[in-house]
Image (tube, rainbow, N blue to C red):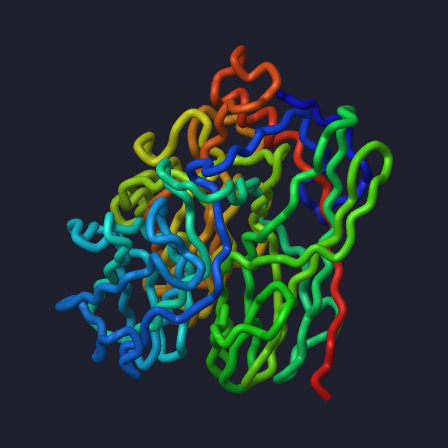
Amino acid sequence: MSRRIAAPLLAIALAGSAWAAAPTSAHAATPGAMGTYHPSTTARVADTQSGWGGRTGYVSSKNSVTYTVTGRNGIPSTGVSAVVVQLTAFDQHGNGAFVAYAAGTSRPAAVSFAYGGRSTQVGRVTVPVSSTGRISVAGAGAYQAHLRIDVVGWYASSSSTAAAGGLYLPSDLELTDDTRMSGARLQPGDQLEEDLEIGFGSDDPNFQAPTVVALDLNISALSPSGTGGLTAWSGTGRRPYVPSLEFGNHDSVSSSVIVPVTLVSSQSEGGGTVATYKFVVGAFGGSTDVALSIGGFYDQGRDAFGAAYRPTAPQLAVNTVTGLGITKGRLGADSARLATLPSSAIDDGTVAVNMTTAAVAPTAGTWVAQTTDLLNTRSTSIINTLAGATRSGTLTAELDSAMNSDLPQVGFYNGKGSIDVQAWTYGRFDFTDDGVVGAKSLSARQLAKRVLSQRPTMRLTHKVIRAH
């Protein structure tokens, strides 16, 4: 039965964010729903230096490695359309890239993760799996690197028999926490314990507030001292040994992760539910300031609502070198530019795309932000890099958040020097009409616009837990 969700419970929202209201309709998740997300036990699949996973040696443009990712670490043997992995490039000597794809298929002419400079770098990638549950990773570019692969979750296929996982709701990528503002720079062993409050409201007495299972989180290590990293996790149990991000001395970097959360409390208020979740970001090795932003979250339950993941053929969608999808020419300092994605990358109900964006041949140390328009050009950086170091950032990029444009657009902002911008799409998130009140009278675009304009309220606060 379809259920109506009413006005917001609380006037709580991220500063400067578009999150202002609770949804007016619900997408009913069903068991085995295709495209829902399932966090898995974070686990290492491969390390080409140590030989973990069975292969030893650098990954370059002349070779590839293949590994089985299903049937282990909490991922089922069947019913999996794609896995979410963290690719780590280390012991490299210059600019290069990795290309991840389903084993047994042709290597796509796309970049999954670009690395540059000498620091160890981590990138999140969503990779389709073969019918036998395997993925391949090949090198690209002039240089080679050792590779680590860590699996963090999976998306269900149409044949999945598992209970429904999380549906995705994007947000504008706003800066939500920054230790530079509070003077809470992290030292080795310190932890940021983050509390996220989310309000769901309904005028239906039978409404069951969805449960948030994971966040789409962007993390930046800023002005680090020493070599080290950051690990984000649910805060329950032991800290995982898999870093979410690694940094070098005085080398600011950014990374995107899907981090599970732990429910702390839930209470009824004003006809709805306010729930508090926690996650933790811990530092190791060196000291650093930390900036966090929430790109969206995954929720599940009988009255969950959101968008389901659909893999698409990887393709180059934006290129300032050739003028593909964007005005031709390098992006200068303190400037922004809109790009239009190809129609093959989206559908009418698409609200976000999985995208890898590269800052190519930067002339100065810089940061790059990706936005839904040109108004919010100083949102959280998805790439931090050094002069000459081509690097990428992976983002679930929300399209025009108000969906006012008929064109699927994203914006890019560059801080210093000049860069070329190249971006590849390899998946999308679509709203469907299952269980949505009045959906049959709406187009897919109208449905997506209705839900996006009335999303749950959120508030993020933190406390610092010092190691000493």
The one nearer the camera, 224 or 166, is 166
Q: Residue at x 32, y 76 (%)?
A: 47
Count numbered badges in the picture: 0
Q: Residue at x 55, y 59 (%)?
A: 259
Residue 254 seen by the camera: yes
Quarter of the image where the C terminus is located: bottom right
Query: Where 291 falls versus 50 (above or below)?
Result: above
Quadrant in which residue 202 is drawn: top right
- Which residue lies most toward the right here? 270
- Which residue lies most toward the top here? 441
Locate residue 221, reporting x and y percent. Answer: 55, 71
- Which residue lies most toward the front here? 161
The one nearer the camera, 150 or 387, is 150
Q: Residue at x 66, y 40 (%)?
A: 210
Locate residue 84, reporting x and y percent. Answer: 41, 56
| Left or right side of 164 for 210 | right
- Which residue lies most toward the left here? 62
| Left or right side of 121 for 230 | right
The one nearer the camera, 290 or 233, is 233
Query: Where 36 falls versus 96 (above or below)?
Result: above
Quadrant in which residue 9 is drawn: top right
Locate residue 247, reporting x and y percent. Answer: 48, 77
Locate residue 437, reporting x and y percent. Answer: 61, 18
Q: Residue at x 57, y 56 (%)?
A: 380
Quarter of the image where the N terminus is located: top right
Residue 389 seen by the camera: no
| Left or right side of 2 for 48 | left
